Image: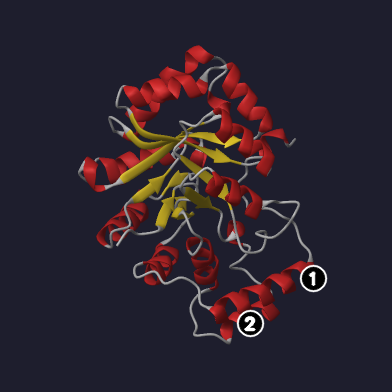
Amino acid sequence: MEKKLGFGCMRLPMIGDEVDLEEFQKMVDYSMKYGFNYFDTAHGYVKQKSELALKNCLTSKYDRNSYILTNKLSVHFFNKEEQIRPLFEQQLKVCGVEYFDYYLMHAQDKAIYQYFQECNAYKIVQELKKEGKIKHMGISFHDKADVLNVILKEHPEIEIVQIQLNYKDYEDASVQSRAVYEVCRKYNKPVLIMEPVKGGGLVNLPNQAKAVFDELHGGSYANYAIRFAASLDGVYKVLSGMSNMEQLKDNISYMKDFQPLNKKEYEAIDKVKNILDSLGGIDCTACCYCVDGCT
């Protein structure tokens, strides 16, 4: 059975400012042991240490055909068209591979998409795919549904779309998670879901929300959030940014023999969502994509 949980490598185990490679190796080995072989990274993750950690703990230890590795073209690392290919080649080298299974245009919104267009990024990535250095090209997306509709209409070569989606924001008209997801379905694009637990916000729940889930069959609060995302049609992988073995083991415990949410679980999620909406709060997933503008 295809495993729907993917390992997001943006929040790795750390010792100070360095990746805890011993702990990460244990996590990679445990993940691979149970057939969870999808790993997602980007050049800037963990202060540019995520790719090298994957080389040390995954790509140098396992056969290339035994895992699926996704990387991304990020706007912060090129200023002009001529820099894209050298950046890509550097990513291959740092990761220790000859090709990426998936390569995504990173964090696409209206402004960044326009910049990628001006730099011919989509064309260059298509060329890299023709050269066999990319198996599948796609985008990760951070904007409204109408913007995604434009991108997918203008670039039918896109094979997969990564979106932010969680049960709290799914029906929120301002966030448009559902609308964005439905655009993916409209264009028959497989979906990768990031931030299903909203940067930990759907794990660290208020007591009244915890009580709703506690009345069910047990299990972690992440269980319901990740399975909500994985239960949607067309979802290829749900990414979890796991930073310790405890989180990994918990996620694998309910995703190794994945079961979609049942009626009672959906009803519980609706109750929890109503509680969270009544309390308000900051809509943040802790992805840190916005912090470059902070002073």
Q: Give me the residue at 46% from left, 57% from top.
A: 242
Q: Give me the residue at 59% from left, 61% from top.
A: 200
Q: Measuring from the top left, give residue 74's x and y in whole percent.
A: 53, 30
**Image quadrant occupied by the C terminus:** top right
Q: Which residue is mark 1?
A: 278
Label 1 is placed on what type of residue? Answer: Ser
Provide the secondary structure element on which disc 2 rests: helix
The answer to whether residue 114 is above or below residue 38 is above
Q: Which residue is mark 2?
A: 212
Q: Which labelled disc corresponds to residue 15?
A: none
Residue farthest along the top direction in this orientation? 82
Q: Is residue 75 visible?
A: yes
Label 2 is placed on what type of residue? Answer: Val
Residue farthest along the left direction in this orientation? 63
Q: Give me the residue at 55% from left, 66% from top.
A: 225
Residue 61 lies left or right of residue 233; in this view the side is: left
Q: Measuring from the top left, give residue 83's x and y in whole percent.
A: 48, 16
The mark nearer the N terminus, 2 or 1, is 2
Q: Quadrant of residue 169?
A: bottom right
